[in-house]
Image: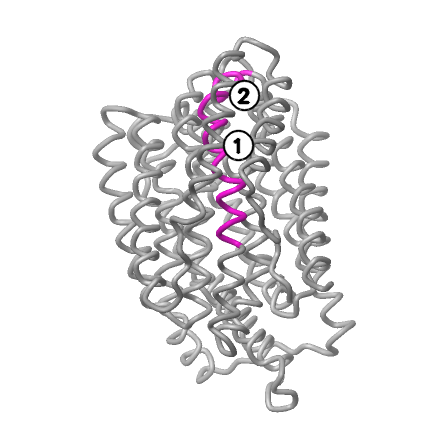
Amino acid sequence: MRLWRNFLSLFIGNALCRFLGFVTILYLARTLAISDFGKINFALAIFTYAQLLADPGLSTLGTREVAKNRTKGKTFSENLFVSRLLGLRLLLAFFSFLIMALFVLLISQSPSTKGLIISYGLSLFPFALLLDWFFQAQERMEYIALSRILTSLIYFFLVITLIKSSAQVSRIPFFWLIGNVGAALFLFSFFLRNSGRLKLTLDFSFWKMFLKLSLSLGVAAGMIQVYSNFALVALGFLKGDECVAFYSAAYKLVFFVLMLDRIFCEVVFPLISRYSQISLQRLKEILTEFLKLVNITAIPISVGGTILARPLMHLIYGGKYDHGAVVLQILIWLVFITSLNSIYTYGLIGLDKEKEYAWAITLGTVSNVVLNLSLIPFLETSGAALAAVLSEGLMLMLMYIKLEKVVKLQFWNYLLKPFLSSLIMVFFLWFLREENLFLLLGGGVLIYFASLYLMGEKTSWLPKK
């Protein structure tokens, strides 16, 4: 029952957040000049690099440690653990902001872009105080959902009411900051109500121990941020703000679709952390159901998105972003590959195999950087999209090899039926591609699931707790 409630809480919360976030992005894309929309996304990409210095895997490790120690009672003080970790996160946020400011002084971007980067950097501090990782470990996802809804509502309301042209572009990072401060205060209030007083603690021995423990996760988190945002940074330096805007528009669509993957990861990760210590058989059952669900949902999304990319981009962003259609046709395959990657990622982390995970992420990130630098000069945004898909595929292959040594998930057994059903759907979409987009989307979904049902595909959708 708790598992279903957690899933529904995060589903409703994330769906609303992603919807509000997507509408906000759409509004900005249509309201701002293409170059200013590109500047906003370039500044956010730089911010994510600063954020990884402020939280090098600490939140993920914090979630795992609290989840594992919930049964230890008085031998594990959650309040003391949280106060120590928050002190460390705030210290790292301060140093990260200083490094970010130094970076801005050294780059040759326009003054307006530099100002946006510094303004976004202020959000490092509310991010350091966020307690979503703690409530995830407690499996109280409703608090996380509510905090994210609050953030999105504040940001959405401020942008929609106060941004009317590119002249107000400098306000946007401050609206984002206000939303994040609201989320941090919201979670703090629930923590204090449920867990009592919290006092930030300076504990250098704990900080040293925890940083050492999080080293592998920190390296992996850094590599993920490099991998996720290097294309935007490279496009910004090599090709200009408009290419950043086209790539970002397509990537935002993919990010929106990946909502379900994020929800399942957050809901299932505490279970993976617990059962990895109790029963490998139970862990295998959880990961297998997750794997089957990914194949059933992600394969048709990637296949259908490839066919419908152009009308989707035109409908959502308007004609000035039609150049992003080819990018979307390539990036949509991240929905399938990234969702599979999540299974193997959290399986390895839950089994305390952070080093194997970090090694796979590092190799994938190096390949991403090399591919971006090699392909962007010739293929521009399409080259960046190809680099993302190919490097994600490499990471999936490496983590598959590592996890299969411990837990065999029989990956290939669950591909055939979703793949064949998707091919049947493709015939429908291709022959009727000139019809109304909403008719194609609805008809494609019905045909896919009807084909899947006739083939006898079954899954329990969520593992029992």
Residue drawn where x is 56% and y is 42% of the image? 456
- Is 150 positioned to the left or the right of 291 in the image? right
> Does dot 2 land on a helix, a strand or a loop?
helix
Q: Is residue 273 magenta?
A: no
Residue named by callout 2: 312
In this view of the protein, can residue 290 be seen by the observer?
Answer: yes
Residue drawn where x is 49% and y is 28% of the image? 249
Q: Which residue is at the front of the view, 463 or 354?
A: 463
Of the residues under marks 2 and 1, which one precedes in the sequence? 1
Q: Quadrant of the C terminus?
A: bottom right
Q: Are marks 2 and 1 in contact (CB under 8 Å)?
A: yes
- In this rendering, the answer to whether 187 lies above or below 110 is below
Q: Which residues are magenta?
A: 290-314
In this view of the protein, can residue 112 be seen by the observer?
Answer: no
Residue drawn where x is 45% and y is 23% of the image? 35
Name the amino acid, label 1.
Answer: Leu
| Alpha carbon distance from label 2 to label 1 | 9 Å
Residue 96 figure quarter: bottom left
Residue drawn where x is 25% and y is 45% of the image? 367
- Is 5 positioned to the left or the right of 385 in the image? right
Q: Position of residue 398 (x, y in %)?
A: 29, 55
Q: Position of residue 183 (x, y in %)?
A: 68, 55
Name the amino acid, label 2.
Answer: Leu
Residue 253 is marked as 1
Q: Position of residue 29 (x, y in %)?
A: 55, 24
Q: Main secondary structure of the magenta part?
A: helix
Name of the residue lying farthest toward the top: 434
Q: Position of residue 376 (x, y in %)?
A: 27, 29
